[in-house]
Image (cartoon, rainbow, N blue to C red):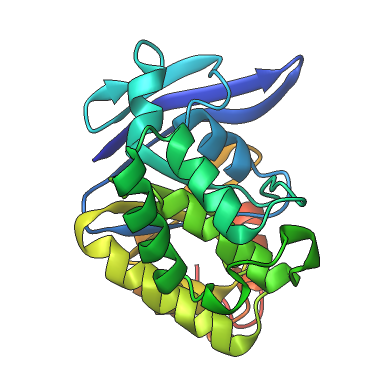
Amino acid sequence: MIRVTELSKSFGEIKAVDKISFEVKEGEVLGFLGPNGAGKSTTMKMITSFISPSGGDATVFGKSILSEPIEVRKKIGYMPENAPLYDDMTVDEFLHYTAQLRGLEKKGQVKAVEKVIEMCALKDVQFQTIETLSKGYKRRTSMAQALIHDPQVLILDEPTDGLDPNQKHDVRTLIKSLAKDKCVILSTHILEEVEAVCTRAIIISSGKKLFDGEASELKEKSSLGRIDDVFRAITTGQEVQGVSL
């Protein structure tokens, strides 16, 4: 499981994340929501040990991001919002390279690549160079690299961004199936995605946690189904049409 305890991050005088605490259990899909600049990506980067916190700590299946960052990274599959990919590699080459970086043995690399190619529906573009792919296929490739080592934890930043409706449905179905034996955190701006995929939702704004509850509860707060309205109502405390605080 993931346990976040008073996690904070400051950049100079700017406090990007302000003493956020929460837990994610195995089998849960946590939707991480908030307006641009709220601190979502910064929190995700701290949990993945990509950046160090200014205060607090987080543990991933008992391993601390402060004292055991390498062990934490082994347990996590991370899909950033703007995932860096090697454009001159084919999808197949990139995934084999990722598998090698993750420490998989030669035979294990082949099996792992075959598995994620199938899971992420990349067969049709397996031997194309990444620079020739559509944004949707690049997102799928990024998802595949996050899954290559069968991690216990998945952290996905806007996983369906750039996908068409059918692709979004496929990715959401995949996330739900993976969540049976993993901890999953995903950021999104789409209320429909929270309802379709997540078991819980957290809203943060200006680095502070403002809401933590079941995804169905968040949906009930907006009869109009617009996440922006929910954000505005919760962050300002003001009445907004169609939102029940």
User: As displayed, is residue 168 above or below residue 59?
Assistant: below
Residue 176, given in percent of the width and then of the height, sits at: 33, 71
The residue that appears at 49% across and 58% down in the rendered structure is 144
Q: Quadrant of residue 217?
A: bottom left
Whether residue 23 appears in this view of the structure is yes
Residue 13, given in percent of the width and then of the height, sits at: 76, 16
Horizontal relation, residue 217 to residue 54: left or right: left
Which sits in the foreground, 173 or 74? 74
User: As displayed, is residue 240 above or below residue 108?
Assistant: below
Q: Residue furthest top?
A: 67
Which sits in the foreground, 174 or 27? 174
**Count of numbered labels shown in the rendering:** 0
The residue that appears at 51% across and 29% down in the rendered structure is 46
Residue 206, given in percent of the width and then of the height, sits at: 66, 39
Q: Quadrant of residue 224?
A: bottom right
Horizontal relation, residue 219 to residue 181: left or right: right
Whether residue 153 appears in this view of the structure is no
User: As displayed, is residue 33 above or below residue 44?
Assistant: below
The residue that appears at 76% across and 52% down in the rendered structure is 87
Residue 54, given in percent of the width and then of the height, sits at: 56, 14
The residue that appears at 54% across and 74% down in the rendered structure is 191
User: As displayed, is residue 209 above or below residue 127?
Assistant: above
Q: Residue furthest front?
A: 106
Which sits in the foreground, 66 or 100? 100
Q: Identify the image quadrant of the N terminus.
A: top left
